[in-house]
């Protein structure tokens, strides 16, 4: 069975589940129409399998679909936005885009 990415709003996070077990997560804070992605982690035994990228893809697609403004405080999420600016940079407030793209 593959990895399933689930939004868990009660815990303010997206979860990567493998056979029902949470093996990774992406945490956030929601403030009105602004979402701050704060932390992403994958259990050490599941690192290197693309799970964090799957979490990022699902979370950022959800942010886009919900019309939220994105603050990528998590270094992994910011790097993912930098790697896919054509899809996700528009979610970041204009005043912060240069900082995100510069890796600051």
Image: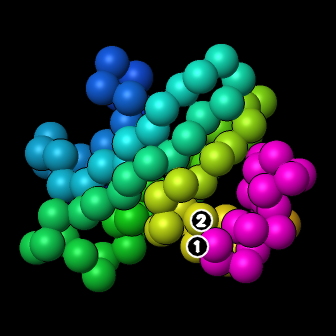
Q: Is residue 11 magenta?
A: no
Q: In screen coordinates, is 20 left or right of 92?
A: left
What number is the disc on residue 79?
1
The residues colored magenta run 87-104
- The vertical placement of 76 against 31, above or below, is below
Query: Residue at the spot x=73%, y=79% of the render?
Result: 102
Q: Percent x, y for residue 16?
A: 30, 50
- What crowding class fits label 1: few (fewer than 14 Cα within 10 Å), some (14-19), or many (20 or more)? some
Q: Judge whether residue 96 is colored magenta.
A: yes
Numbered disc 1: secondary structure = helix
**Colour mapping used in the image:** rainbow
The residue that appears at 29% across and 81% down in the rendered structure is 48
Residue drawn at x 78%, y 56% is 96
Query: Is there any visible trace of residue 85 in the rendered image?
Result: no
Principal SS element in the magenta part?
helix
| Left or right: where 32 falls relative to 24 | right
To which quarter of the image does residue 65 belong? top right
Q: Is residue 17 visible?
A: yes
In the image, 60: left or right of 86?
Answer: left
Q: Which residue is identified by label 2? A: 78
Above or below, 40 relative to 15:
below
Residue 14 image point, x, y percent = 39, 40
Which image quadrant for residue 13? Answer: top left
Which quadrant is the N terminus positioned in? Answer: bottom left
């Amino acid at each position: 069975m593959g990895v399933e990415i689930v939004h868990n709003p009660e815990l303010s996070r997206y979860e990567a589940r493998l056979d029902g077990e949470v093996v990774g997560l992406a945490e956030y804070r929601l403030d009105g129409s602004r979402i701050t992605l704060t932390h992403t982690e994958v259990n050490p035994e599941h690192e290197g399998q693309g799970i964090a990228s799957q979490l990022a893809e699902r979370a950022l697609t959800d942010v886009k679909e919900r019309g939220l403004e994105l603050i990528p405080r998590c270094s992994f999420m910011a790097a993912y936005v930098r790697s896919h600016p054509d899809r996700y940079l528009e979610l970041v407030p204009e005043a912060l885009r240069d900082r995100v793209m510069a890796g600051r």
